[in-house]
Image (tube, rainbow, N blue to C red):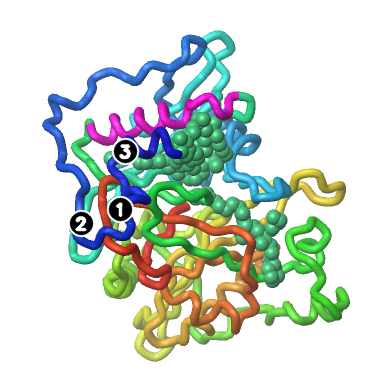
Amino acid sequence: RHKFWETQPVGQFRDVADTSLPDGPIEPPTPLSEVRADPYPLPAAFEWLTCDLDDDALLADLYSLLAHNYVEDDENMFRFNYSPAFLRWALKPPSFFRAWHIGVRAKESKKLVAFISGVPARIRARDDVVRMAEINFLCVHKKLRSKRLAPVLIREVTRRVHQENIWQAAYTAGVVLPTPITTCRYWHRSLNPKKLIDVGFSRLGPRMTMSRTVRLYKLPDAPLTPGFRRMELRDVAAVTRLLRAYLARFVVAPDFDEVDVEHWLLPQEDVVDSYLVESPETHEVTDFCSFYTLPSSVLNNANYATLKAAYSYYNVSTKTALQQLMNDALIVAKQKNYDVFNALDVMENESFLKELKFGPGDGQLHYYLYNYRIRNGIKPSELGLVLL
Ligand code: NHW
Ligand code: EN5
């Protein structure tokens, strides 16, 4: 059934019930001298291209490949539209490897037709902090689908990750593969209900008028929590302390240090936004919330071309109730003109989703580890990892 995935060191469906298999690496590392030295062969018309994302022209080509060929919802009404600035942020974290930004182009036209990427991360599974690659942006041009190009891309990124002496990876997908460590649901909070209904993202509820719906989703004009403000560079140490203490509670979570926090959480306009609560009395940083910006193209709508979506990222509450903190996140997202605020049911998010009028979406997100088994998997609430 899975001609490619059956050959890979991942949890297999046939082993799901086998509780005798231990947690941890599925296969041991091989000596670096045994890692294949040359790239996997591509069909003759194509060639590998290691991408330099500092090159604006190349970045524009990658943006365009993804804007036209990346992930759509199940009814092909929306397609993710990651911005060039977002792609640079997502793909160039501390100590990134340029060799892990892998394009495929047509030899003749030089057109970029496929892509896959990895970035390095330390991810903790139970008490084991493991160096991993986070794999993302796997994409094959629509005209080249179903030709078994994806397994070649996956093998090639695996080879280049192995060359760095890294043997595990984390990735998410909307499709079921062998085998998820957990399956999460997307939830959506309308900020601009009229537009969402117009583009078919949501529907007018039964016995609801447009004006009642607009009123239902109304939010205050400014955040309510005293001391709520945007995160700044001087906050990196305090945010790192808060976040490390919080993520320690989950079974699978990133192991962030200050360098990581500066990259992944310091605000960047239209890429990532972070806010915190600084106690007006003690000036202590007690709470933190963040979201990233990922618009979707609206396919086939006469009135709108894009939906501006915020995605809940990492949130930590110690003094302000999480629900109140996230209400302030909704308020700032509304101020900044986002149409919808999305969140997964990971970490403690269940505790605010219904109360803050999020509704369940039709999409799921499956989380995977490569070459690392977690017996019986985990619950979404035990997961402390958000991938972009
Ligand atoms: S998930 C988003 C993936 N991208 C999209 O959905 C964009 C739109 N779709 C496409 O571009 C986030 C194509 O449909 C793709 C498949 C390229 C998806 N993950 O070439 P074939 C990520 O980027 C398997 C993994 O004929 P295609 C995470 C499929 O099961 N495998 O299909 C990426 C089948 O194998 P099987 C996927 O439609 C994680 C084979 O591909 C997959 O033309 C990557 C068919 O290939 C998916 N999303 O192209 C894994 N979708 O065994 C990283 C399909 O079932 C692993 N397939 O026969 C770790 C590596 C690093 C390890 C380091 C130690
Ligand atoms: C790797 N980083 O399906 C990502 N999105 O629910 C790759 N649905 O937006 C994997 N179908 O439910 C990505 N509106 C997997 C997700 C792919 C994209 C996807 C879903 C997530 C989505 C929307 C639109 C559905 C359009 C028709 C949806 C309902 C919202 C409603 C608002 C009011 C309260 C009830 C819910």
**Residue 50 occupies which quadrant of the picture?**
top left
Q: Which residue is mark 2?
A: 21
Q: Which residue is mark 1?
A: 15
Give the side of residue 165 with respect to residue 232, left or right.
left
Relative to 83, does residue 313 appear above or below in the rendering?
below
Does any atom of ligand 1 lie closer than 8 Å to the CB of label 3? yes
Relative to 126, does residue 59 appear above or below in the rendering?
above
Q: Quadrant of ligand 2?
A: bottom right
Which is in the foreground here, disc 3 or disc 1? 1
Q: Which residues are magenta?
A: 144-162
Other-residue count near label 2 (Cα within 10 Å), few / some / many at <14 / 14–19 / ≥20: few
Does any atom of ligand 1 lie closer than 8 Å to the CB of label 2? no
Is 17 magenta? The answer is no
Q: Secondary structure at mark 2?
A: loop
Which is in the foreground here, disc 2 or disc 3? 2
State yes or no: discs 3 and 1 in contact (Cβ < 8 Å).
no
- Which amino acid type is marked by label 3? Gln
Q: Main secondary structure of the magenta part?
A: helix
Other-residue count near label 3 (Cα within 10 Å), few / some / many at <14 / 14–19 / ≥20: some
Confirm whether residue 338 shows in the render: no
